[in-house]
Image: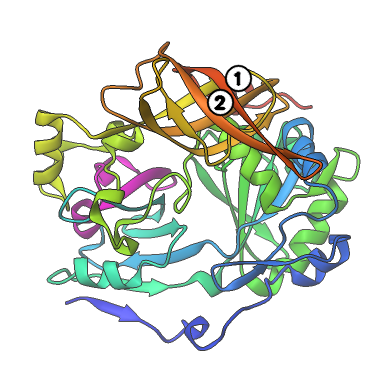
């Protein structure tokens, strides 16, 4: 029997919430600008998105991830249900580990991506960009599983950058340096439990801290006191956007349209079309979309998500991609000028057969200078590797920067 606990899901009754860290965010938010992420107020930039970006790459940037949608999964059929829902084999995510995954509709189109936290034996938490309770309820029919939307019950901070581990050690989290990538562990903290996972959305050394909301302010204070000499800075969503593009991470609503939101099914994407075929495990048995994905693997995909290295210094935001002969090849989904790569880079969805590494293409870029629009056809090439993937991201223990 499927059970869905709405007892704590009071966010359905309100338009927008301040984060448990709001009082501290307010102190740092010199620009006094706020935006909305899910049901929460969020900060696009505290004082300068470029400098916040450099904090995440050169020191320690702190981003509030409380608004991330969270679902706690328990019950005798928690694992069978997850394995039926996800494209990857969830059995391989052992207790104390975190795994990235996607889930699809029956047509093999991605509904969302997210992380699966195996908190303890038989207890999981799914973190995602979009609200998923409706799909989870539908998919759980016939399973003895309890699904709790516990977004409001967990406050979170992403602590990212080369000095992040040093900051956490300075905060008194003894042994945190031994935590491996995609691992999680627990610490005693002010009379409660602080969960720390070596995860993040920046492609760099980084951690995520999870605590009960009533301890959010003291966690922020302890963290920033520990990081005072390590370049710690609050970081907004604009800086995080730059960091994730450099790392080649995709974002729902930007690089793909969640299938549950699509009016036109042809505008959706499969895992293969998002370069996430490595997350599809046909050997594990039945899962949502398996039949359609097997057919796609046999016949080929419509699109391919690729990384582009573009000549010049103009970001190719919302640009069309063409062949050298002027034939339409695809569209740019995310783009930026990368300070770390010293290049204009982009993620793009290209039509088959385009997208092989090394392929030479052109991007149509429009930019405005002093109210005048300019058009540039910038040469570009498909590259295989991400633009930011430092060894410190994987090193255990990390160097003490």
Q: Which residue is at a point 41% across and 59% down the rendered structure image?
A: 125
Residue 28 shows in this picture:
yes
What residue does disc 1 label? 391
In space, the residues marked 2 and 1 are separated at their CA atoms by: 6 Å
Is 380 on the left or on the right of 158, as rendered? Answer: left
- Residues in magenta? 80-104
Disc sitting over residue 394 in the figure: 2
Tell which of 79 and 261 is nearer to you. 261
Numbered disc 2: secondary structure: loop
Q: Residues within 10 Å of mark 2 (few under 14, many from 20)?
A: some
Is 229 on the left or on the right of 280, as rendered? Answer: right
Tell which of 170 and 384 is nearer to you. 384
> Do the residues under discs 2 and 1 have CB atoms within 8 angstroms?
yes
Q: Which residue is at a point 9% across and 37% down the rendered structure image?
A: 295
Q: Horizontal and vertical percent for residue 111? A: 31, 55
Q: Which residue is at a point 90% across and 45% down the rendered structure image?
A: 228
In magenta segment, residue 65: no
């Amino acid at each position: 029997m499927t059970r869905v606990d709405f007892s704590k899901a009071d966010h359905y009754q309100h338009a927008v919430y301040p984060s448990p860290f709001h009082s501290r965010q307010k102190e740092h938010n010199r620009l006094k600008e706020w935006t909305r992420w899910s049901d929460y107020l969020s900060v696009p930039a505290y004082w300068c998105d470029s400098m916040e970006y450099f904090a995440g790459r050169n020191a320690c940037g702190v981003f509030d991830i409380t608004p991330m949608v969270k679902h706690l999964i328990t019950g005798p059929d928690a694992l069978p249900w997850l394995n039926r829902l996800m494209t990857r084999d969830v059995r391989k995510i052992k207790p104390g580990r975190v795994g990235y995954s996607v889930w699809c509709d029956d047509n093999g189109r991605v509904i969302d991506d997210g992380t699966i936290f195996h908190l303890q034996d038989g207890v999981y938490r799914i973190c995602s960009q979009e609200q998923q309770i409706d799909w989870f309820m539908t998919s759980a029919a016939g399973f003895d599983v309890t699904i709790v939307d516990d977004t409001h019950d967990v406050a979170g901070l992403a602590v990212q950058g080369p000095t992040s581990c040093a900051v956490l050690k300075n905060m008194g989290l003894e042994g945190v340096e031994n935590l491996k990538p995609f691992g999680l562990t627990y610490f005693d903290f002010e009379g409660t439990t602080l969960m720390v996972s070596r995860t993040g959305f920046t492609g760099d050394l980084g951690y995520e801290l999870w605590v009960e909301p009533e301890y959010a302010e003291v966690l922020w204070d302890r963290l920033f006191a520990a990081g005072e000499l390590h370049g710690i800075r609050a970081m907004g969503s604009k800086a995080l956007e730059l960091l994730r593009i450099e790392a080649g991470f995709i974002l729902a609503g930007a690089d793909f349209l969640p299938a549950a939101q699509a009016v036109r099914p042809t505008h959706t994407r499969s895992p293969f079309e998002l370069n996430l075929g490595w997350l599809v495990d046909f050997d594990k048995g039945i899962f949502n979309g398996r039949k359609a994905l097997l057919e796609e693997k046999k016949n080929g995909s419509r699109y391919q998500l690729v990384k582009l290295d573009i000549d010049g210094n103009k970001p190719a935001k919302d640009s069309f991609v063409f062949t050298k002969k002027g034939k339409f090849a695809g569209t740019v989904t995310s783009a930026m000028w990368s300070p770390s790569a010293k290049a204009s880079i982009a993620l793009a969805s290209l039509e088959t057969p385009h997208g092989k590494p090394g392929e030479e293409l052109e991007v149509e870029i429009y930019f405005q200078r002093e109210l005048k629009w300019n058009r540039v056809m910038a040469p570009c090439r498909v590259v295989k590797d991400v633009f930011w993937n430092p060894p410190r991201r994987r090193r255990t223990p990390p160097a003490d920067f």
